[in-house]
Image (cartoon, rainbow, N blue to C red):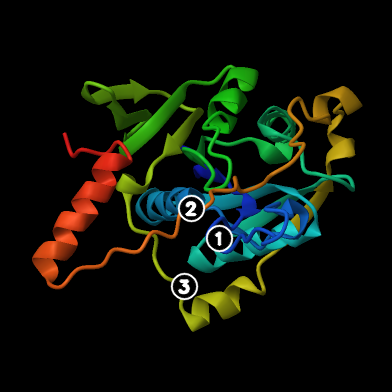
Amino acid sequence: MSLPRRWVVAVKHGIDVNLTRADPTTGRIDLARAPRKTSDFDKNAVEEAVRLREKHGGTVTVVTVGPATAREAIRDALAIGADEGVLLAAPDGPVGDSRAVAGTLAAYFRTPGGAFDLALFGEGSTDHFSGTVGPRVAAELGFPSLSHVRQLTIDGGHLRVHRDIDSGIEELESGFPAVVTVGQEINTPRMPTFLSTLKSSKKEIREIPIDSLGLSASKWTRSIVIQEASVPSVPRKKIRVSGENPSALSHELVELLRREGIDGK
């Protein structure tokens, strides 16, 4: 008799780009104070893991790397239906970049408590969208990497996926363990109910300091540092269009656009 499957999902508590605002005077965006939320693509990964558990059994563990506030992303995943959460607690200061986060996750997955059959990732985060964390983890662990997956099925000991490529859709088959990144085409995440949210507050979140994973300081150091985030200044010409009737207004607008080099061709 085969052992229960272990489905693992990596989630990110990233910047909510829809609520990020720039200083009207300087145009700069304070990323440190920007509102944060669970990355949208990660919710699709959590939903897919929950569906796999509902069909094939096993447990769903959600993992994130970050400060204590990243627990919010874990709580969101637990409300969708994950069974437990793991916070890989980062040191004070900015969270590592894609390379550092992938290295941290791979180090955790090498531990006895981090072993999995299938690890699911969103194909990118809604703030940075490097699209590299899942494939990096697979490369570090030496596991198959299946990216941009839009359909996933399991038949015995085989994982079958449909994935998007430039020329169409590709069908692939893999064994276990494997690492998969999914897009939003794969499913529609369920909305947590009041009851599921209440139950999620009682589910366990284990906290593991990343310095207990045997990572060197250089492994966590960011390779890419954001010096500044700002909105470019685009001065408006404030041109007014006038005319006696809609036809005249349209004619004047067309002439103005032509003078700006926009001829509609």
Give above or below for 117 relative to 27. Answer: above
Give above or below for 207 relative to 151. Answer: below
Label 2 sits on a secondary structure element that is: helix
For disc 1, the marked residue is 77
For disc 3, the marked residue is 192
Residue type at mark 1: give it.
Answer: Ala
View extreme (left): residue: 247
On the image, the x and y values in percent for residue 86 come to: 70, 51
How far apart are the two marked residues, 2 and 1, measured between alpha carbons?
6 Å
* Residue depicted at x 55% and y 60%: 77
On the image, the x and y values in percent for residue 203 come to: 65, 67
* Residue depicted at x 33% and y 41%: 260
Residue type at mark 3: give it.
Answer: Pro
For disc 2, the marked residue is 46
For the C terminus, the quadrant is top left
| Nearest to N terminus: mark 2 or mark 3 | 2
Instruction: Looking at the picture, tell me which residue is in the foreground, 163 or 206.
Output: 163
Instruction: Find out whether the residues at labels 2 and 1 contact each other: C-beta distance under 8 Å.
Output: yes
In the rendered structure, the answer to whether residue 203 lies left or right of residue 104 reads left
* Residue depicted at x 83% and y 34%: 213
The disc at residue 93 is: none
